[in-house]
Image: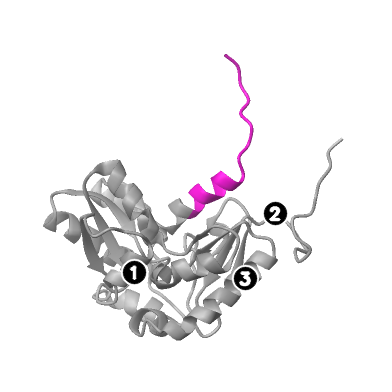
C-alpha cells in the first residue's frame, strides 16, 4: 500500500515540477518557445511578471523589477513547483536575489549553462542574444560566469523580423525570416572565431531555431530548453529496469 503526503498546504494541485517566470509581452509564442507549454514533454506552470516588459528588462535594466520577480517566484513556489526558471536570459540580473527569496532551486537565465558548456568543450562559447548591446558584465556576474571563460556574442538586433516580431510586440512574427536571421548570426560567429566549440541561445524565443543552427554550424546548441529538461530530469528520477 502506498502512502502519499502533501508537500504544502498552499498547493491545490500537483504534477508541475518546473515554474516559469514570463515577461509581460505580446507576440506569438510558437512551439519551441519557452512560453509555449507544448514545447515540453511534461507539465509546466507559468507566472507572468506584471509590468516586466522587454524594454524595462533589456534596455533599462530596471532594478525596480526585482520585487515583482520575487513575488511571482513566491507565487510559483506556493503553487507547488519544485524549481523556477525564467523566459528571458536577461533575468540573470535577478538570479541571486530570486534564489535567496524562495526555497526551491532557481535557474533564471540560460546564461547559467556557460561554465558547463566551456567545461565540456574547452573552447569559446558563442552566445546568440536578443540584443548584444544590452548584454553586460552584470548579466554574466549574476550567473557566476567568470571572466576567464572565452565567449563570443552575436545579437539579433540587426534582424528586422526579430526586432518587429519579438521586441516591438506587434502581435505577429515572420517565422521564416527570423529563422534565416538567427542562422546568419550563428554562422557569422563561427566564421569570426575558429575556436568556437558550441553555441548558446540566450533568448527564450530562439529555441525553435536550434535545429537549424546546428545543421548550419555542426556545433552543439544549448538553450533554455536544454537547461529546463536537464533540471526537470533531476527532479523526477525514475528507477532503472533491465537485466545483466
Q: Secondary structure at mark 2?
A: loop
Q: Which residue lies at the image location 34% right of the left edge and 83% below the top edge?
A: 59
Q: Using the image, tell me which numbered label, if any, was put on residue 15.
A: 2
Q: Position of residue 105 (x, y in %)?
A: 54, 57
Q: How many marks?
A: 3
Q: Residues within 10 Å of mark 2 (few under 14, many from 20)?
A: few
Quadrant of residue 166 within the rendered picture: bottom left
Q: Which residues are magenta?
A: 228-244
Q: CA distance from mark 2 to mark 1?
A: 32 Å
Residue underneath mark 1: 139
Please tell me which residue lies in front, 32 or 201. Answer: 201
| Viewer-nearest of discs 2 and 3 | 3
Residue 157 on image: x %, y %: 27, 76
Circles 3 and 1 in contact, beta carbons < 8 Å: no
Answer left or right for 156 relative to 240. Answer: left
Q: Identify whether 54 is placed above or below 198.
A: below
Q: Per the image, is 168 magenta? A: no
**Marks 2/3: CA–CA distance:** 18 Å
Work out how far the residue at label 3 is from the one at label 1, CA to CA, in angstroms.
22 Å
Please name the residue shown 40% across and 60% down the image. 110
Q: Please say whether residue 35 is visible from this viewpoint.
A: no
Amino acid at each position: 500500500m502506498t502512502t502519499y503526503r502533501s508537500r504544502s498546504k498552499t498547493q491545490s494541485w500537483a504534477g508541475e515540477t518546473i515554474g516559469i517566470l514570463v515577461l509581460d509581452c505580446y507576440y506569438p509564442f510558437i512551439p519551441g518557445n519557452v512560453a509555449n507549454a507544448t514545447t515540453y514533454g511534461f507539465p509546466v506552470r507559468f507566472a507572468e511578471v506584471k509590468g516586466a516588459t522587454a524594454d524595462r528588462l533589456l534596455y533599462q535594466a530596471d532594478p525596480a523589477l526585482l520585487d515583482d520577480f520575487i513575488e511571482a517566484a513566491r507565487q510559483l513556489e506556493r503553487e507547488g513547483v519544485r524549481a523556477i526558471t525564467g523566459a528571458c536570459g536577461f533575468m540573470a540580473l535577478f538570479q541571486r536575489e530570486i534564489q535567496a527569496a524562495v526555497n526551491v532551486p532557481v535557474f533564471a537565465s540560460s546564461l547559467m549553462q556557460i561554465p558547463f558548456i566551456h567545461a565540456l568543450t574547452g573552447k569559446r562559447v558563442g552566445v546568440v542574444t536578443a540584443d548584444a548591446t544590452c548584454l553586460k558584465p552584470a548579466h554574466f556576474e549574476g550567473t557566476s560566469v567568470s571572466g576567464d571563460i572565452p565567449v563570443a556574442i552575436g545579437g539579433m538586433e540587426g534582424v528586422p523580423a526579430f526586432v518587429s516580431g519579438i521586441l516591438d510586440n506587434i502581435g505577429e512574427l515572420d517565422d521564416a525570416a527570423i529563422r534565416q536571421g538567427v542562422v546568419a548570426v550563428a554562422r557569422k560567429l563561427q566564421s569570426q572565431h575558429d575556436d568556437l566549440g558550441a553555441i548558446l541561445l540566450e533568448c527564450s524565443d530562439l529555441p525553435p531555431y536550434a535545429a537549424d543552427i546546428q545543421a548550419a554550424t555542426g556545433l552543439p546548441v544549448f538553450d533554455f530548453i536544454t537547461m529546463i529538461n536537464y533540471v526537470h530530469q533531476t527532479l523526477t528520477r525514475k528507477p532503472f529496469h533491465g537485466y545483466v
